[in-house]
Image (spheres, rainbow, N blue to C red):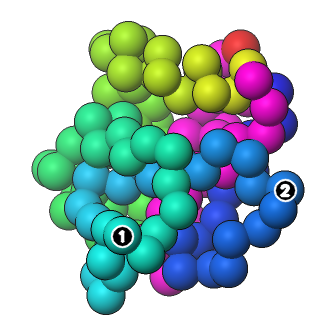
Amino acid sequence: MLIKTKRIYAKTGTDDGARILVDRLWPRGLRKDEVKIALWLKDIAPSEELRKWFAHDPKKWNEFKRRYFAELNENPEMLAPLYAHAKTGATTLLFGAKDEKHNNAVALKEFIETNR
């Protein structure tokens, strides 16, 4: 399973494979008809409460991941569409955050890689 992460504002690459948006909110400034994605998995994103608590604060990163992983473990069926795409080839998890190291797509990739 080859899973990558990429900011949705970055240029689409030929090696992206299935491009899956994993944010709860649609990225600012982008129209849905101008973004190439296979799926938008809103429900796989952190809960609204967790998203607001984290606020992309790197100091909260480890606790954010712990809480987000707990949410994912409570609802494993949310991962089924993502796994279905990942089994067929390269998959890119798209996110809108400016911080490319501390965001839910990076955390989700880590969760998938450690829970295969």
2 vs 20: above or below = above
Tell me: 116 left or right of 43.
Answer: right
Relative to 74, is 85 on the left or the right? right
Q: Earlier in the sequence, mark 1 or mark 2?
A: 2
Q: Point out the frontmost of discs 1 and 2.
A: 1
Q: Nearer the viewer, residue 30 or 94?
A: 30
Q: Residue at x 50, y 54 (%)?
A: 37
Instruction: Tell me the kind of residue under disc 1.
Output: Asp
Dot 1: what SS?
helix
Q: Looking at this view, is 113 or 2 the one in front?
A: 2
Q: Nearer the viewer, residue 105 or 41?
A: 41
Q: Which residue is mark 1?
A: 33
Would you name the residue on which mark 2 appears? 15
* Residue 106, above or below 33: above
- Tell which residue pokes out farthest to the front in this image: 33
Q: Position of residue 2 (x, y in %)?
A: 82, 36
Question: Which image quadrant is residue 47 in?
Answer: top left
Circle 2 SS class: loop
| Magenta part of the chain | 88-115
Residue 59 appears in the picture as rendered: no
Quadrant where the N terminus is found in the figure:
top right
